[in-house]
Amino acid sequence: MKNFYINIIILLKNYPISTVWSIAIFVLSIMPKSSLQADILFFEHFDKLVHCCLYSLMTLTFTLENYKKNNVSKSFSQSIVIIFSASIYGFLIEIAQKFLTINRVFDILDVFANIFGAILGSFASLLLIKFYRKKKSSNM
């Protein structure tokens, strides 16, 4: 258990925004559903859009923090690892919802929305990195 806490501290130190965002996703995902959630559904399957946005922002921040920390050009291969990790994370949260909560269920469409969001966030971060590099090289 000690190693778990050490790993969390390392993540917080190296990827503070992404780690906090990932923890927030977990907490929001296992919280009991409230009547408020039913009231904010603007259209059917609105929650899938929310899942997509949450995971898009998670992969975006992980990729950008990783780029800032390492300043490496292996962004594409690292993005694949981040997409895969975010997808597994989302899948495990869906399993946790099934077994650890009372009024939440496993939804395969949520898993697909998470994966799609992770892919979108990763592509967005690659575009931002490319734009940043281009702007940085033109300023030199």
Image (tube, rainbow, N blue to C red):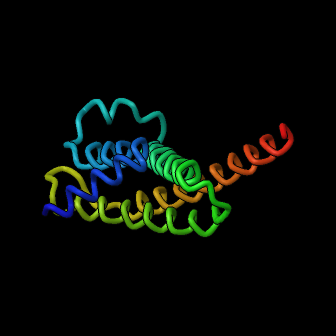
What is the quadrant of the N terminus in the image?
bottom left
For the image, the number of numbered tags is 0
**Pick the front one: 88 or 114:** 88
Q: Is residue 123 left or right of residue 135?
A: left
Look at 53% across and 51% down and name the residue there: 69
**Pick the front one: 47 or 88:** 88
Look at 51% across and 63% down and name the residue there: 83
- Which x, y percent locates residue 81? 51, 68
What is the quadrant of the C terminus in the image?
top right
Look at 19% across and 43% down and name the residue there: 32
**Pick the front one: 127 or 33:** 127
**Pick the front one: 36 or 12:** 12
Q: Is residue 140 above or below residue 60?
A: above
Residue 98, image quadrant:
bottom left
Q: Is residue 25 above or below residue 113?
A: above
- Which x, y percent locates residue 82? 50, 62
Residue 73, image quadrant:
bottom right
- Which x, y percent locates residue 96? 23, 61
Look at 74% across and 51% down and name the residue there: 130
Q: Is residue 73 left or right of residue 69?
A: right
